[in-house]
Image (tube, helix red, strand yellow):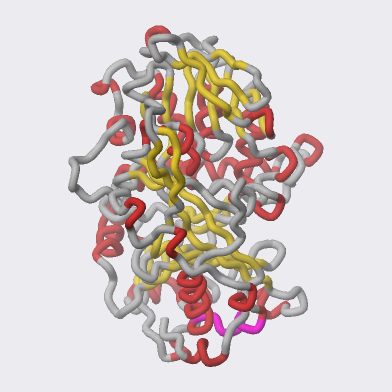
């Protein structure tokens, strides 16, 4: 279906109430569309997007990184700069909303985004090329004064004037006093987003603007409704109800490749590994040390490569989250092909709440996380690991989003491929989705729309790991998984830690 057949009263059905679906619904309503429905099998009105209450989407989490650091990729940098302005507006708007008008799980005392800074540490004594390029890009935007290079005398002198206790932020892991290398950048523009609360807020705004929601089992997609020529004209949900539409948008996160076979050469579900440490309330010294006003978001060794790790200040309940994304695990199942003539391997999420339950992470990932904690945050060792989670992302073949009409199916659009960096765009992404929907030709699209269009690569070209397939080194069935005993720290193991 082309955009000239589309009117503001056309029924639009969105599958998925995560970041991509919520932002799309919100901006469609802002643009004057009046018949928008978002479907999701998750009962978010009950679990409040909380992983501890049963939510298993990547969008449902304690916290996500807010950053504008994108190396030489100015497009995402500028979109993030626009996004942070709206995050600030949302903080202000939420603070002025009476609790009686807010959904369960939200309070006017909540902050959706916390500007605590982002400490990006190198493994050695050299800044990475990506970090150096980021500094150039932010300098060109007039933001060099917000970036502080560790060990740079001029920057550290500026920091003393700007921060009451700059050492708490700059050496948050106390590496100097342990004789460890301290090299990196402190980014004062960055911080973290309270992810679950941000999704609740976005859903609240969408409802207020007229977006309808069908969530819970009645919101589970059973099938697409197609005409004889293949045109998609609606969706059928698990309760057997047909919902007609002039446009169906699949925004189902890591479940997108399972639901939409045609994207499988472009998108793949991959798992990042997360561990949680619960600080006892009795340890007020540690509650103070790891509070957002004293402790930044941090990454070590590059968040997404090698031994890439990252962590956050404690939550309001004293939980510290540390994630490992150095290996992106896949979990293959056999699903019908696009024409349903044969079965093909597809990576599908395997979570605490999926039909095939998985509560463990890999031993490889946990050992890396524990080694990092033992070396850099030894004060947390006595508490052990209080919980773990596999966070399933949707990686694209080039880490760009996929927001496009599906070429082979009129009436169908895909909005996915967050690739581990999509959450920060919740307040702004939908604006670009609407622009893509309303564009008739490729040349009508702006830079975002053109870059996020349907695409492929030549056979044999690198595809961001999608080429690994069932025989690759990241397959879940090949991994050794943790036991309960692994959640505690072993003295001999800790002493061998070198991270």
- Is 409 left or right of 174, judged from the image as shown? left
Q: Using the image as rendered, state which of residue 103 and residue 43 is in the foreground.
A: 43
- Is 21 left or right of 357, judged from the image as shown? left
Quadrant of the image occupied by residue 377? bottom right
Please identify the residue farthest to the front as the structure is shown: 342
Task: From the top left corner, tell me how far across and down residue 73 is, in percent.
Answer: 28, 48
Residue lying at 44% horizontally and 42% vertically, measured from the top left: 334
Tell me how many marks there are: 0
Q: Using the image as rendered, state which of residue 272 and residue 317 is in the foreground.
A: 272
- Is 216 left or right of 142, judged from the image as shown? right
Vertical side of 64 occupied by 169: above or below: below
Residue 426 in sight from this viewpoint: yes
Q: Quadrant of the N terminus?
A: top left
Task: From the top left corner, tell me how far across and down residue 441 is, in percent.
Answer: 27, 18
Quadrant of the image occupied by residue 286? bottom right
Asked whether residue 51 is drawn in magenta, I would say no
Quadrant of the image occupied by residue 279? bottom right
Vertical side of 239 occupied by 417: above or below: below
Residue 292 in sight from this viewpoint: no
Asked whether residue 377 is drawn in magenta, I would say yes
Q: Which residues are magenta?
A: 376-382
Task: From the top left corner, tell me how far across and down residue 209 is, in percent.
Answer: 63, 24
Q: Quadrant of the C terminus?
A: bottom left
Vertical side of 266 occupied by 191: above or below: below
Q: Main secondary structure of the magenta part?
A: helix
Vertical side of 485 occupied by 481: above or below: above
Task: From the top left corner, tell me how far across and down residue 391 is, in percent.
Answer: 53, 54
């Amino acid at each position: 279906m082309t955009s000239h057949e589309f009117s503001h009263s056309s029924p639009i059905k969105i599958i998925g109430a995560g970041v991509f679906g919520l932002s799309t619904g919100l901006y469609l309503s802002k643009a004057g569309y009046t018949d928008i429905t978002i479907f999701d099998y998750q009962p978010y009105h009950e679990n409040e997007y909380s992983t501890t209450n049963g939510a298993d989407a990547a969008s449902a989490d304690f916290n996500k990184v807010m950053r504008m650091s994108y190396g030489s990729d100015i497009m995402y940098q500028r979109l993030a700069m626009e996004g942070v302005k709206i995050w600030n507006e949302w903080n202000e708007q939420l603070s002025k909303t009476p609790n009686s008008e807010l959904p369960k799980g939200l309070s006017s005392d909540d902050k959706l985004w916390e500007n605590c800074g982002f400490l990006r540490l190198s493994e050695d004594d050299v800044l990475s090329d990506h970090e150096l390029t980021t500094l150039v890009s932010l300098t060109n935007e007039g933001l060099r004064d917000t970036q502080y290079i560790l060990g740079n005398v001029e920057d550290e002198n500026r920091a003393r004037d700007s921060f009451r206790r700059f050492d708490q932020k700059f050496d948050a892991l106390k590496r100097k006093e342990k004789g460890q290398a301290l090299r990196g950048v402190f980014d004062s523009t960055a911080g973290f987003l309270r992810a679950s609360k941000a999704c609740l807020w976005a859903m609240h705004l969408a409802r207020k603007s007229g977006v309808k929601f069908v969530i819970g089992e009645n919101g589970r997609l059973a099938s697409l409704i197609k005409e004889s020529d293949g045109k998609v004209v609606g969706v059928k949900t698990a309760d057997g109800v047909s919902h007609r539409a002039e446009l169906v948008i699949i925004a189902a996160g890591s479940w997108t490749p399972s639901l939409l076979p045609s994207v499988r050469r472009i998108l793949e579900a991959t798992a990042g590994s997360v561990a949680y440490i619960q600080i006892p309330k009795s340890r007020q010294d540690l509650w103070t040390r790891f509070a957002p006003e004293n402790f930044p978001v941090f990454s070590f060794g590059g968040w997404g490569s090698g031994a890439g790790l990252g962590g956050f200040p404690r939550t309001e309940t004293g939980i510290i989250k540390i994630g490992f994304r150095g290996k992106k695990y896949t979990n293959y199942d056999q699903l019908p092909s696009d024409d349903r003539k044969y079965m093909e391997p597809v990576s599908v999420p395997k979570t605490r709440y999926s039909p095939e339950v998985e509560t463990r992470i890999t031993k490889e990932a946990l050992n890396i996380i524990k080694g990092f904690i033992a070396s850099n945050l030894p004060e947390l060792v006595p508490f052990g690991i209080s919980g773990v989670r596999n966070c399933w992302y949707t990686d694209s073949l080039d880490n760009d989003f996929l927001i496009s009409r599906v070429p082979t199916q009129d009436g169908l659009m895909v909005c996915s491929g967050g690739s581990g960096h999509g959450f920060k765009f919740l307040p702004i992404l939908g604006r670009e989705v609407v622009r893509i929907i309303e564009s008739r030709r490729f040349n009508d699209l702006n830079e975002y729309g053109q870059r996020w269009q349907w695409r492929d690569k030549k056979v044999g070209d690198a595809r961001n790991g999608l080429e690994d397939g069932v025989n690759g080194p990241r397959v879940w069935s090949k991994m050794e998984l943790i036991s309960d005993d692994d959640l505690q720290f072993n003295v001999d193991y800790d002493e061998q830690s070198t991270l």
